[in-house]
Image (cartoon, rainbow, N blue to C red):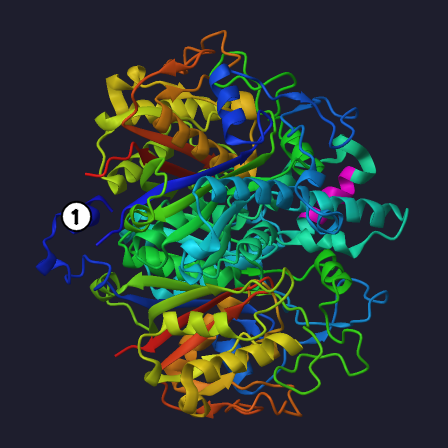
Amino acid sequence: MEVDNKTFKNTSNSELQTPHSPEARRVVITGLGIVSSLGVGKEEFWENCLQGISGIRPIRGFDVNSYRSRLGAQLPEVDFKAFIKPANLRRMDRIGRIVLSAVRLALDDSGIDLKKEDPHRMGISMGTGLGSSDTVDQFFRSLLKEGPIGAAPLLFQTAVPNAIASHCSIEYGIKGINLTFSHKETSTEMAMAFAYHLLKEGRADIILAGGGDELSEPLYHVYSMLGALSPGRGKTLEGMRPFDRNRNGIVLGEGSGILVLETLEHAEKRGAKIYAEVSGVGMAGSTEGLLRYDLKGDSIAKAMSIATKEPSTIDYISAAANSTPDLDRAEILAIKKVFRERAREISVSGLKSMIGEFDGSGGIRACGVALSLHHGVILPTIGTEDLDPQCDLNIILGQPEKREIRSALLNGCSNGGSNISVWFKRYG
Amino acid sequence: MRKRVVITGLGVVSAVGNSIPEFWDSLIGGKDGTKEITAFDPSPYRTKMAAEVSNFEPEAHFSKKEIRRLSRCDQFGLVAFREAWRSAQLDRDLVDRERAGVVLGAGSGGILSVEKYFRDFYQGLKRPSPSLLISYSLATTTDHIAIESGLKGLRSTTTTVCSSSSASIGVAYEMIQTGLVDVMVTGGSDSLCEVSYSGFGSLKLIDPESCKPFDKRRQGLIIGEGAGLLILEELEHALRRDAPIRSEFMGYGICADAYHLTAPEPNGEGVERVIRIALDHAGITPEGVDTINAHGTATPFNDIAETRGIKRVFGERAKDIPISGIKSMVGHCLGSAGGIEAVATVLTVENGIIPPTIHYQVPDPLCDLNYTPNQSIQREVRAALSNSFAFGGNNVCLVFKKFSSE
């Protein structure tokens, strides 16, 4: 870091376009790690997505009889021992294990040899909405039952939201930037966005970016009490069906997606395979209310326009669409505002239709976009049968679409009004 | 080119004052905000003290309807925000609201409200109100401030517990210096709750009497609460509107110990590294630093590691640098600790007065620096550091400098 910053400070204007300047430095994706309801590892995930399989099933593990909702997109059994050192595994709760497994997969996929890397030039940028919600609940219930003596130190130390990033730095000896973001449904997109900026600024060579969330009973309870879960108060069926006329709320999911983000210079030096380039991020807020989305789509549009400098090359938008009446419509409005007559040429699809909605979904969805760019295939939106006439764009329904993708946007939108868009470009 | 970033507004809610003038008077007067806990019944606990915010009347700031929907954390955050915004002489029309945003750090967030809900729910006493759950997300205070101020630029929430709001200040700075935004509201808010109190208690990290940083008798933290908010602004933007410039933000460092889930790396290696990264990023040599606002939690291990880290950076000169441990007065405010301490650091640079570390009586041979014991001192400050370290070895260091237009 010292070297880079000094170089930057001392360069004259004519030298600012060298790889040492933020303007010229490029950021690429060199590894993907996925632990999802559609499988563990990018191969299994991709196969299942192509076939349009849904990760949504009846909830296992806790009783949902007192709720109006029955469904969730939960993980299959994961053999965490295969991914995490035994001594560290014992100290991790479930969300720690889920994310650390995705980290292992991403690092393996990237071919990074940790022995050859400077640990101070590697960083971690994690996003999680509610982190260890289950551990916090266990801690609290034990405190209620037994008083102070019931407060369990081992639960407490893993219950803090940055424990995931700490586990990760300890497991791999990563000593650079270490950040955790928690901002509702945009938590992981933000972790990636800041990782992108920090790499551009030369503050690290490699950042593990992404994150995840778990589906726990207390979390299900909270979402249900706040009226966020499908089927809401309506009479229609429970389910995730983005852009459908009868969409009626979210189905909760869980999982983790991690991207190895790296400066192009560093990736080339070690001969890494490159999935795609991250070429920009945009963020914008709306101020309509605490649990409201950006209803007119203006700030979603703003985020997309800041993210991409070449709107004419956008062939695919991985939508934030989460099957709520407000967000899906607003996102369509936003796409029309930005792309105007070109809007219908863009393939739009919502991966949340398969993996459910959760605050930390952005990592998995970003891995999906990277794989789409790499394979030239757009993943379908499933579950949608009766397309809302207001959602009249080229929405890829049911079957994947083969298409050369020049560049793509990944959108994230949170209730309360924080919106983000990440621009991915095909590399090479 | 990097843009220069200055601080143009400050706001605070704390155990020693709910406005900047009151807070600063208390700090330089060495006032302790520690009292017996009122937020919940402390009688079952071995320790009973905390640095709670007092004389805070929600009704003076919010309507009844608002109070029902705002957690204590949201209320602190909004009140400190209003002071910071006013003191920066900003209003909606003076900024391009699409180029102004909010990045806050969060710790326990609205968990106090969520605790209330689940306490009733699990004890089956009554049907609790779901509106207590609105604060379930750590981003709630950030969203409230953005909605109230109408700021439409980027918005985010960082959460690395005890260093959360220092990290948020680093992130806010980064976004301005790259030219993405002109103005950022940053810092953090947090409120005392039983989950975090009992958690730190279970780790045997709470002192039964008072917080005594760097003193040999220290036994740990006193948990505090409150909010510390700062307005960061791009220099040209601030100059154009003739804004009150309080100090310049020069840079930051963030790094990880990669050592242990709760204990700091004992030799101060992580502390050394984060200070060096911050100074290098700020373009300031160690010789330019005149004071350090320490993390100084008064846990036995933290204070030794921090002392060692400071010595590793400053060598012989370390003994000449007055260090402040203001947690001795405001407690450890977790998610807002970094914000409140950053506010104190800006005031230190601005006023040339270094607040003391109070309750300092018995020197510890392992903590052998100048901790500004019990009395504030006057001294011209060119640049000051504010340290924050968190569980899991998440280290942050911020660098503030006296503003000069050169």
Write down the residue under mark 1: A9
Q: Is residue A79 above or below residue A68?
A: above
- Which quarter of the figure has residue A283? bottom left
The magenta stretch is A136-143
Q: Taking B217 as reference, is A10 left or right?
A: left
Quadrant of residue A111 in the image?
A: bottom left
Q: Tell whether position A138 is magenta.
A: yes
Q: Is residue A78 above or below residue B308?
A: below
- Residue B43: x %, y % from top left: 79, 24
Q: Quadrant of the C terminus of chain A?
A: bottom left
Q: Label 1 marks which chain's residue? A: A
Three-letter amino acid code at disc 1?
Lys
Nearest the viewer among A111 and B308 is B308
Q: Is residue A419 visible?
A: yes
Relative horizontal placement of residue A276, taking residue A414 as reference (left or right):
left
In the image, residue B50 lies in the stretch drawn in magenta = no
Q: What secondary structure characterizes most of the magenta part?
A: helix
Count of marks placed on residues? 1
A240 in relation to A414, above or below:
below
Label 1 Cα crowd, 10 Å radius (few <14 / some 14-19 / many 20+):
some
Residue A371: image x %, image y %? 42, 78
Whether residue A207 sits left or right of residue A145 in the image: it is left
**Residue found at x 56% / y 49%:** A89
Residue at x-position 35% and y-position 59%:
B180
Per the image, label 1 sits on a secondary structure element best described as helix
**B154 vs A186, nearest the viewer:** B154
Residue B100 place in picture, x, y as percent = 42, 56
Is residue A367 visible in the rendered image? The answer is no
Where is residue B116? Give x, y as percent.
77, 44
In the orientation shown, which residue stands out farthest toward the right?
B125
Asked if B45 appears above or below A380 in the picture, the reply is: above
